[in-house]
Image (spheres, rainbow, N blue to C red):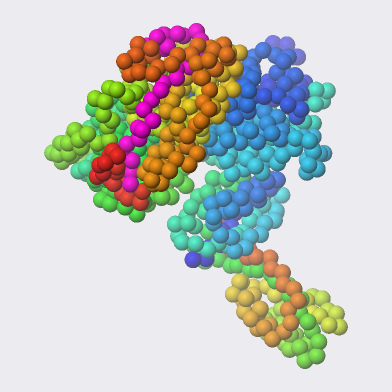
Amino acid sequence: MRHIISVLMENEAGALARVVGLFAQRGYNIESLNVAPTDDQTLSRLTLVTKGEDRVVEQITKHLNKLIEVVKLVDLTEGSHIERELMMVKVRATGAQREEVKRTCDIFRGQIIDVTPTTYTIQVTGNEEKVNAFMDALSGATIMEVVRTGVSGLARGDKTLSL
Amino acid sequence: MTQAAHEPEMLSGGEMLIRSLKDQGVEFIYGYPGGAVLHIYDAIHNQSDVKHILVRHEQAATHMADAYARASGKAGVVLVTSGPGATNAITGIATAYMDSIPMVVITGQVMSHLIGDDAFQETDMMGLSRPIVKHNISVRDPADIPTIVKKAFYIAESGRPGPVVIDIPKDMTMPNEKFPYEYPDRIKMRSYNPVKKGHSGQIRKAVNALLQAKRPIIYSGGGVILGKASKELTQLARQLNYPVTNTLMGLGAFPGTDRQFIGMLGMHGAYEANMTMHNADLILAIGARFDDRVTNNPAKFCPDATIIHIDIDPASISKIIQADIPIVGPVKPVLKEMLEQIEQSKLRVDDEALGLWWEQIEEWRQRHGGRYRSDDSEKMKPQHVIETLCKITNGDAYICSDVGQHQMFAAQYYKYNKPNRWINSGGLGTMGFGLPAAMGVQLNYPDAAVVCVTGEGSIQMNIQELATCKQYQLPVKVLCLNNGYLGMVRQWQDMNYESRYSNSYVDSLPDFVALAEAYGHAGIRIESPDELEAKLTEAMAITDKVVFIDVLIDPDEHVYPMQVPGGSMADMFLSKTERT
């Protein structure tokens, strides 16, 4: 089962290494991970996506909580939540492909953020499923480069992960 | 008081470090100097409150500090230099980590501006130690040193204890750069708040289950000793009249000579302890973590048992064995609350069922499960040596063990009636732990009888510390069960490799008696069972110097019982020819 774990932690050197190290040491799997400071510069917010049995995910959250720099965490997939990921794709845009790629991009409400006579760079945001669907839709095109941020998310409604 | 008294004193980083240790109440630190920590060593030289013990290898410093913590409950302190000093400390840090022992390890580091340049004696101690510490902190501003020291002790000693590393670049300790010194009274951290008590609702559920059990057992571990809850455990057990088994780390938390004590459990646990566990309908696990050396195959673990698990670390609960009633909290207040709730409960222990259960346990106890044959008087049996030691010391010595067969014999045959007396590397199984551990205890408890129970394999892993014993007059007794083999390795080779002794024979052993004498100590060799008691008594009576007691034991002896790999707790080899 896929879980999105969102972690609020002290914005200190080495804190990220502790999280990554924990996953490596205990053989847990990380699908994606991102981290950046929040509105409070002393805090970072880290979102990671992992897959595993409930027992394993329970251990993951317990061990994350044990890290001294972790202030709070939530498994977003336990409640209703919003998740987004940003992807940039550089595709070959020549001949008939130039128009076809543009049409696909429009359907997915992507934006072309860089153009050359032979390439487009497209930005797509959405949940993981949408971003994957866009990649599938591009299967006819020549993909030159892909970069994804990994998932970020938060709970719906009044629920927050804050101090 | 004059106005001047309120003005903070101006100290260098190195001076602040040592002053902080003093203000923390530290009497001894264990270490070894080197380039990156020379400013700190100079600060040590200029005061007399904090005394430094110079070891011969940094690993020994960590074990000394560790054993002090195991005996006293307070964090031990280590000071080593960068690079090889720090890497030599790693084994000791990992040893403490595995057994949740509070320790503060101060490692030197190269100058801040050199970090990352592969400077002389540079090693990434923050990265190296990360997986084997509770926390580590790198000093980036000398002014932070007092707060960092306070924080390190707070983290090391609170919650589930563990080692904390403070990595200090040399430029943080410059003698000419002074800062206002003030040691904080307390530390508050928004990200670290160890739990102070258990959940009352969960405790109520546990008490209900506990009082309705027909075949209960109390399984208690090192957490009871770390949590200083030996008294509460004993009170609970006596009140309920339930049988008690201890883990290797928990020995002494419940009196070893008590009628209700059914021995250590696990891989080399007592027959009756493992049988009682396996057939129980309720297990009250207290500060124990269902280690693989206890459970044997988790899939076959205690099939009928409801499991109540009390632990301060939620990550220990339901990690290996699913708990039916988890209680997260420090053992002492949880047990106190349990006792109160038992008092108030309308339920009463089912005395009839309990009587039948005790009958069954006594029957298991009567069976000669895994005990050695004491009638074989020709050979020196290691078990008999430990029993004799127990007799001579009235079961009241600090026993600091190394790792191997002798460790298991010392766990099985010495009867620990007090907590903090049995000091061994349980989780990591570190050979070389015993001698420095005994030194750490002896230094802090100078009048106590302290015995390092070891083998000729383990002792040679830190034998250089005999010099440290001389320097600081630490009259430990080294009881070496010498069989000329790495006994536990040999046992496994006997059992699983058709006695092909691949590299388990220790050739070219030194003459330990002569070696001890060369270091300025006394040495005694015991070769026959007839002379054992007299010579051991004689050795133990020498209280002003180290006595190395080299006992030549039967090399064919195995540790029994031994759980059958892949089986349940009740599947055991009881001797070379019998199994359950």
- Residue placed at 72% from the left, 15% from the top? B45
Toward the viewer: B9 or B486? B486
- Residue placed at 57% from the left, 54% from the top? A23
Toward the viewer: B63 or B152? B63
Find out whether residue B542 is within the magenta segment: yes
**Furthest-right residue in this view:** A117
On the image, the x and y values in percent for residue B68 come to 52, 23
Toward the viewer: B526 or B480? B526
- Residue placed at 53% from the left, 49% from the top? A63
Q: Is residue B276 visible?
A: yes
Q: Quadrant of residue B19?
A: top right
**B117 up-or-down from B456: above or below:** below
Q: Is residue B443 visible?
A: no
Name the quarter where the C terminus of chain B is drawn: top left
On the image, the x and y values in percent for residue B457 come to 49, 30
Toward the viewer: B309 or B40? B40
- Residue placed at 83% from the left, 23% from the top? B176
Does B291 sit left or right of A113 as displayed? left
Find out whether residue B269 is within the magenta segment: no
On the image, the x and y values in percent for residue B157 come to 53, 31
Q: Quadrant of residue B203?
A: top left
Name the quarter where the N terminus of chain B is drawn: top right
The residues colored magenta run B537-564
Q: Quadrant of residue B353?
A: top left
